[in-house]
Amino acid sequence: MSRKSSHIAVLLGSARDPSNTRKATAVVCDELDKAGCQVTLLDPRQLTLGLPGHGQDPKVMTRMQDMVRDADGVVMVTPEYDGSFSAAIKLMIEHLGYPSVLQNKPISLLGVASGGIGAVKALEHLRSVCGSIGGIPLPYSKSINLVDRVFDENGVVLDQKAGKAMASAATDLLEFLNP
């Protein structure tokens, strides 16, 4: 099957380094690279994300909005913190304007968590927010449980089933874009 080359924005929901979220994001980006996509990674460590209504840098907002606006689709990767998605993902969403540049964009969701049920709550909340701002969250979010057992210290995937699920956050989006 031949696919049109796509431009995908990937929003990384963790500023920690190292982090399992960062490792999962690398799996997604590698899969997109293999498919020949142009990948734009939005990493909160490389952005100055002030609080909404206070301290937002208009240049950062414009740059982020342009990056996402130019993308054909979006992948959001979040850890589950306290039963929801990360503040880093929320701040990125807040910086994407109103109306949001996520409006009418297909969005693939991937969540990681150390617990046995994975990032189910984080993904429920994130799906709701994405839909509320007019994004198009794909029907099947990917939740990786017991993520602290999925990678070695170098980010090598030890659990092939989890590796396939993480990669499918990328391939499902590409299938949606290029049926």
Image (spheres, grey):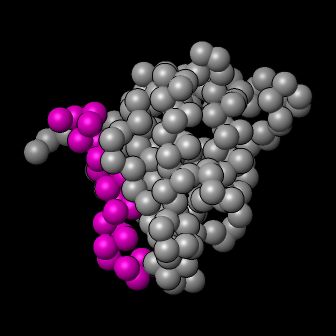
Q: Can you say whether 20 is above or below 89 in the image?
A: below
Report the side of 108 relative to 152 (left or right): left
Magenta segment: 154-179
Among the 4 quarters of the image, the one containing residue 2: top left
Task: Give percent across and percent down for residue 87.
Answer: 71, 47
Q: Quadrant of residue 48?
A: top right
- Image coordinates of residue 11 in percent, x first then y, are 56, 45
Q: Quadrant of residue 64?
A: top right
Callout count? 0
User: Can residue 31 be seen here?
Assistant: no
Q: Position of residue 14 (x, y in %)?
A: 66, 57
- The residue that appears at 44% across and 60% down in the rendered structure is 143
Q: Is residue 164 magenta?
A: yes
In screen coordinates, is 32 left or right of 95?
left
Q: Nearer the viewer, residue 81 or 2?
A: 81
Which quarter of the image is occupied by the C terminus? Answer: top left
Q: Is residue 117 above or below residue 110?
A: below
- Residue at the far left: name it: 1
Q: Is residue 49 magenta?
A: no
Q: Which sits in the foreground, 44 or 128?
A: 128
Please name whichever residue, 178 or 89, is drawn nearer the observer in this view of the structure. 89
Q: Tell me if residue 102 comes above or below residue 92 in the rendering.
A: above
Q: Is residue 73 above or below residue 172?
A: above
Residue at 39% over, 56% down: 142
Q: Classify residue 126 as left or right of residue 58.
A: left
Q: Is residue 123 visible?
A: yes
